[in-house]
Image: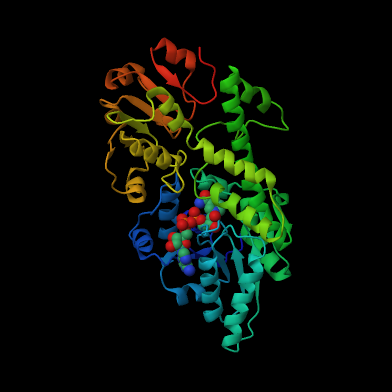
């Protein structure tokens, strides 16, 4: 059978809650800590504070089995786990570097209260060298109370995707473990072995390589997006169709189909901040990451691509125009609003005097929290309601629910049949036949 372990998760957000729940699923005894009492209240009363497919049922099942618990009590959380996963946020600070204050606070809490051997696992995305800082912080706290308990710090970056987080965690492509201590390596192995049929999928390496691997992965993915956006903009000028080009290059296995979709620029809680953090790390070591500089500036410009198309159609002044906006979350199947392109589109429209009615299948509540009240911005209860007496529809997030609307109905509800599509959801030929003025990204106009 599986070896089960006492595990503490520090930081019960998207990553922490998924990690804790999936580890409980294999029989481990998991305690999740958060400093935000609101989140812990929701979890204790049987709900979950985020939207993630499949997560709620899994949390429920493991709570009922007594393997998954939640707390705000730091001392209890330190005492509980032999393994302590740090999964707190690492947001950008003013210059774009990863802000380590939550990671350091978590490490200090462990050092202040630990009494026996512990393995501290950096699960958060943290710059190369952070494991050394975590080690130093814990050692300092131990020294301050004349304690000589031993411990190991491991790097175990997370590669799950929001919207498919449970699936990704339960059936990972690979598990990266940066570890330089044999006891810690054995413990990490027994935790993760149940998740992989083929143990070669657990990649052991030194700590710094593991830390860098996470940034390398996100930087590569961001690069693909900016590259495709740049080509889409060129295709538009050339009278070529980026959809044909995408399929034409994706069929080469060295390139592959994934992550080749042009759109409104990458957003979310990871790519923007991780690209910037890697640039800052490189700068600290005197290296300029030229490719990533370009990736970032292309992305910055691309976030305004829909606004530019709208201005080209209506002119700079959008006063008196009303827009329906479909999709608020930064991508489908999540309610995450961090760095969501929809926010830039909304601000751009409002700033030019337009009004907006927005709809999202899941992120309405989170959007209202994140964006707050804005003059000229309203929220609709359905995609249909958003369309009512709008001058045009703007599609920002590629939710499935938006892929095959009843175009007759859309035409009837809109004042004019105009669609700006930031995700290329529809076929230009079809749209023309349906009588729409259609503005996709990088596609050939029929
Ligand atoms: P999040 O913001 O959803 O969750 C972080 C949680 O940590 C919050 O609930 C916060 O209250 C809590 N927290 C902060 N300080 C604490 C402390 N000292 N003790 C206990 N709890 C504390 O963040 P998310 O999205 O889960 O990200 C966490 C880390 O994982 C980040 O470094 C992120 O870059 C990384 N990551 C995120 C992925 C994602 O898709 N969201 C994917 C892979 C990595």
Report the side of 343 relative to 199 (left or right).
Answer: left
Q: Is residue 2 above or below residue 333?
A: below
Q: Residue at x 53, y 37 (%)?
A: 301
Q: Position of residue 188 (x, y in %)?
A: 65, 62
The residue lying toward the viewer, choosing from 402 and 77, is 402
Q: Position of residue 157 (x, y in %)?
A: 61, 56
Report the side of 424 relative to 134 (left or right).
Answer: left
Report the side of 105 relative to 354 (left or right).
Answer: right
Q: Residue at x 65, y 45 (%)?
A: 292
Whether residue 99 is visible here, answered yes or no, is: yes
Q: Position of residue 140 (x, y in %)?
A: 60, 81
The residue lying toward the viewer, choosing from 110 and 249, is 249
| Residue farthest to the top, as pictured | 433
Q: Is residue 205 above or below residue 353?
A: below
Whether residue 25 is visible here, answered yes or no, is: no
Q: Residue at x 42, y 10 (%)?
A: 433
Colour mode of the rendering: rainbow
Q: Position of residue 39 (x, y in %)?
A: 38, 60
Quadrant where the N terminus lies?
Answer: bottom right
Q: Is residue 197 above or below residue 7?
A: above
Q: How many numbered circles are shown? A: 0
Q: Is residue 285 above or below residue 411?
A: below
Q: Residue at x 51, y 26 (%)?
A: 441
| Residue farthest to the bottom, as pictured | 146
The residue lying toward the viewer, choosing from 35 and 48, is 35
Using the rendered view, name the quadrant where residue 129 is placed.
bottom right
Using the rendered view, name the quadrant where residue 411 is placed.
top left
């Amino acid at each position: 059978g599986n070896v089960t372990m006492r595990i503490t998760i520090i930081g019960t957000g998207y990553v922490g809650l998924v990690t804790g729940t999936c580890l409980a699923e294999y029989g481990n005894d998991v305690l999740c800590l958060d400093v935000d009492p609101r989140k812990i209240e929701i979890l204790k009363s049987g709900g979950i504070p985020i939207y993630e497919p499949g997560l709620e049922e899994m949390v429920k099942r493991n709570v009922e089995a007594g393997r998954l618990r939640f707390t705000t009590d730091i001392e209890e959380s330190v005492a509980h786990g032999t393994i302590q996963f740090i999964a707190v946020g690492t947001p950008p600070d003013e210059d774009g570097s990863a802000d380590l204050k939550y990671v350091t606070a978590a490490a200090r809490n462990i050092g202040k209260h630990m009494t026996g051997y512990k393995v501290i696992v950096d699960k958060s995305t943290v710059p190369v060298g952070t494991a050394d800082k975590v080690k130093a912080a814990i050692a300092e706290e131990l020294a301050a109370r004349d304690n000589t308990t031993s411990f190991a710090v491991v790097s175990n970056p997370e590669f799950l995707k929001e919207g498919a987080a449970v699936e990704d965690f339960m059936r990972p492509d690979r598990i990266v473990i940066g570890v330089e201590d044999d006891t810690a390596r054995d413990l990490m192995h027994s935790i993760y072995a149940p998740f992989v049929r083929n143990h070669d999928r657990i990649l052991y390496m030194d700590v710094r390589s593991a830390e860098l691997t996470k940034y390398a992965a996100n930087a590569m993915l961001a690069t693909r997006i900016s590259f495709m956006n740049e080509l889409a903009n060129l295709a538009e000028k050339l009278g070529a169709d980026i959809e044909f080009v995408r399929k034409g290059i994706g069929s080469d296995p060295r390139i592959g189909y994934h992550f080749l979709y042009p759109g409104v620029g990458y957003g979310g809680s990871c790519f923007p901040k991780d690209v910037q953090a890697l640039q800052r790390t490189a700068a600290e070591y005197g290296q300029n990451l030229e490719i990533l500089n370009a990736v970032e500036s292309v992305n910055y410009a691309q976030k305004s691509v829909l606004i530019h198309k709208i201005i080209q159609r209506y002119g700079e002044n959008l006063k008196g125009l009303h827009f329906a906006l479909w999709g608020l979350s930064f991508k489908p199947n999540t309610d995450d609003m961090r760095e969501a392109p929809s926010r830039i589109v909304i601000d751009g429209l409002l700033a030019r005097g337009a009004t907006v009615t927005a709809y999202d299948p899941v992120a309405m509540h989170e959007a209202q929290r994140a964006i707050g009240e804005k003059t000229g911005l309203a929220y609709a209860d359905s995609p249909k309601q958003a369309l009512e007496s709008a001058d045009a529809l703007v599609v920002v997030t590629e939710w499935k629910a938006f892929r095959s609307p009843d175009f007759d109905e859309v035409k009837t509800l809109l004042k004019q049949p105009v669609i700006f599509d930031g995700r290329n959801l529809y076929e230009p030929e079809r749209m023309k036949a349906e009588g729409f003025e259609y503005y996709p990204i990088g596609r050939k106009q029929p």
